[in-house]
C-alpha cells in the first residue's frame, strides 16, 4: 500500500450530491489487510438501468465475466453492486467462479436483490484465491448500514495502491428538470486504455432505458477513460458501471446535456486516476493534431504517453523533444518527418523536420518544472486530432511495484 499521498492529489474528497434511489455502505472484511475498509455495497431501487464497459483482456477475472453476462437484463427489480479490494479474484480458475457465486448468493439473501441483478467486482493481487467467506460474513452488516450519503466510504473501500479516494459529480438541467450525477473510481497502476482501465461506479437519478444508457456510456468512455495511461498495462479486472435510478423523473434519452454532464464526471475521474499514478509527480497532457484521421492521432498520442523514455525525461524535467520524435515514428500510424511540429507548453521546439529557429531550450525547460506538462504535436498531414493523458515515470513507481505483494 502507498503511504504518501500523491503530490497531484486534490485537497480533499469532494462533496458529492445525494443520488436518490441508491444507498451505500462499507466495511472492513480483512480480505488482505486487517482493520482496513475493503468491501462496499451499493443498493439501487427497482427500475434502475445498469450500463457498463469492461476490460478486453483475454485473462479477465471471474467477476468481470459475470457482470458482462448480466448487462441488458430486465430493470423492474432492484440492483446491487458489491466490490472488494485486496484480491482481484483473477486467474483463479473454477475457484474464482465459485467465489463469485457465493458472494452473489449472500448478497441476494441479505438485500432481497435477484442474483441476476447483482454486479460484483474485485481488485488487488492476481492469482490468489479470494477468501470470499470474509466478504459474505459482512453482508448483513453492510445491508444494515446502508445510507444515501455514504458514498465517500464506498470510494475508500475500493482503493488498492491508490493514495486518495476519488469522486466527482455534476448537475445538469434537461427539459426543465434537474438531474444529478455522482461517481467514484479507483486506479493508480496497471492503467492503460482498453475500456475503462480501473474500477468506476457512477450513479445518476436520470430516467433512461438501458440501451440508450449503454450507448452513451460507451461513447463517453472512449473519450475519457480510454484516453488515459499510467504504465501501458491493462488490468484483468477493469470495470465501469453506470446506474440510472430514474428517481428524478427526468427523461434524458437523447439529451446532449446529460451526455456532456456524464463526460464531465468521467473525465474528472479519469484525470484523478492519472494524477494518482504510482509514483507520479507530473500530470501530462499530450495533444496531437494534423494527423490523417482521429484514430491515427490517438495512436501517436498513446505512443508518446506510453514511452518510458518520454516519461522518464518528464520526470527529470528534461525537454528532450527527440524522444517525442522517436515515439511518433514508432507508433505505426502515418507520419512525415518533414511536416512534424512539436511544442512543450507554448514553446515551439521543432518544425519542418528540424529544431525550430526560434527555439530557446531554457523556455521549454521552465515549462518542464511545472506539475502540468503539455506536449503538442502537429503532424501536418490532415485534420485528425486526439488528446490523451498520462503521468511521468519515477523511482516511486518501481518502489511501489517491487514489493506490492509483500
Image: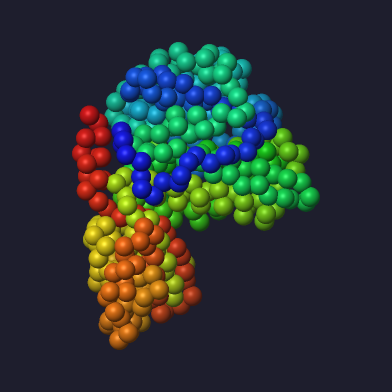
Name the spot of residue 363 as percent of width and height, x first: 32, 74
How many numbered circles are shown?
Answer: 0
Q: Is residue 165 left or right of residue 277?
A: right
Say which of 319 and 43 sits in front. 319
Extreme right residue here? 176
Residue 142's place in the image compared with 44, above or below, is: above
- What's the residue at 47%, 69% (across, down)? 385
Name the spot of residue 283 as percent of width and height, x first: 38, 56
Can the viewer see residue 292? no
Name the spot of residue 10 as percent of width and height, x first: 45, 46
Say which of 11 and 176 sits in front. 11
Residue 226's place in the image compared with 354, above or below, is: above
| Residue 248 placement: quadrant | top right
- What's the residue at 25%, 65% (across, down)? 318
Residue 27's place in the image compared with 344, above or below, is: above
| Residue 47 placement: quadrant | top right
Name the spot of residue 196 as percent of width and height, x first: 45, 46
Q: Quadrant of the C terminus?
A: top left
- What's the residue at 25%, 31% (across, down)? 405
| Residue 316 placement: quadrant | bottom left
- Colour scheme employed for the rendering of this structure: rainbow
- What's the residue at 45%, 51% (across, down)? 271
Can the viewer see residue 130? yes
Q: Quadrant of the N terminus?
A: top left
Amino acid at each position: 500500500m502507498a503511504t504518501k499521498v500523491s503530490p497531484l492529489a486534490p485537497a480533499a474528497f469532494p462533496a458529492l450530491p445525494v443520488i436518490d434511489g441508491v444507498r451505500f455502505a462499507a466495511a472492513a472484511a480483512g480480505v488482505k489487510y486487517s482493520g482496513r475498509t475493503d468491501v462496499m455495497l451499493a443498493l439501487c431501487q427497482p427500475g434502475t438501468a445498469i450500463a457498463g464497459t469492461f476490460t478486453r483482456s483475454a485473462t479477465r477475472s471471474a467477476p468481470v465475466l459475470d457482470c458482462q453476462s448480466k448487462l441488458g437484463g430486465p430493470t423492474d427489480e432492484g440492483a446491487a453492486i458489491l466490490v472488494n479490494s485486496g484480491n482481484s479474484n483473477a486467474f483463479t480458475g473454477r475457484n474464482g467462479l465459485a467465489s463469485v457465486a457465493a458472494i452473489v448468493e449472500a448478497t441476494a439473501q441479505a438485500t432481497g436483490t435477484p442474483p441476476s441483478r447483482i454486479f460484483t467486482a474485485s481488485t488487488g493481487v492476481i492469482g490468489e484465491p479470494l477468501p470470499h467467506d470474509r466478504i459474505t460474513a459482512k453482508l448483513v452488516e453492510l445491508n444494515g448500514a446502508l445510507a444515501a450519503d455514504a458514498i465517500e466510504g464506498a470510494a475508500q473501500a475500493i482503493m488498492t495502491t491508490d493514495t486518495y479516494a476519488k469522486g466527482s459529480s455534476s448537475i445538469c438541467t434537461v427539459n426543465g428538470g434537474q438531474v444529478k450525477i455522482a461517481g467514484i473510481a479507483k486506479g493508480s497502476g496497471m492503467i492503460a486504455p482498453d475500456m475503462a482501465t480501473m474500477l468506476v461506479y457512477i450513479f445518476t437519478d436520470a430516467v433512461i432505458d438501458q440501451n440508450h444508457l449503454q450507448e452513451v456510456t460507451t461513447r463517453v468512455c472512449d473519450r475519457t477513460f480510454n484516453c488515459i495511461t499510467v504504465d501501458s498495462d491493462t488490468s484483468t479486472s477493469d470495470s465501469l458501471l453506470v446506474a440510472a435510478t430514474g428517481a428524478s423523473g427526468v427523461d434524458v434519452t437523447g439529451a446532449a446535456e446529460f451526455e456532456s454532464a456524464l463526460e464531465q464526471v468521467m473525465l474528472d475521474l479519469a484525470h484523478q486516476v492519472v494524477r494518482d499514478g504510482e509514483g507520479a509527480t507530473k500530470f501530462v497532457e499530450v495533444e496531437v493534431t494534423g494527423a490523417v484521421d482521429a484514430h491515427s492521432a490517438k495512436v501517436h498520442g498513446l505512443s508518446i504517453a506510453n514511452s518510458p523514455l518520454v516519461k522518464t525525461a518528464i520526470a527529470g524535467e528534461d525537454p528532450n523533444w527527440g524522444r517525442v520524435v522517436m515515439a511518433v515514428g514508432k507508433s505505426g500510424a502515418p507520419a512525415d518527418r518533414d511536416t512534424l511540429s512539436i511544442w512543450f507548453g507554448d514553446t515551439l521546439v521543432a518544425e519542418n523536420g528540424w529544431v525550430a529557429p526560434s527555439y530557446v531550450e531554457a523556455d521549454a525547460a521552465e515549462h518542464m518544472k511545472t506539475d502540468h506538462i503539455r506536449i503538442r504535436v502537429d503532424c501536418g498531414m490532415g485534420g485528425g486530432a486526439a488528446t490523451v493523458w498520462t503521468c511521468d515515470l519515477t523511482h516511486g513507481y518501481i518502489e511501489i511495484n517491487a514489493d506490492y505483494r509483500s
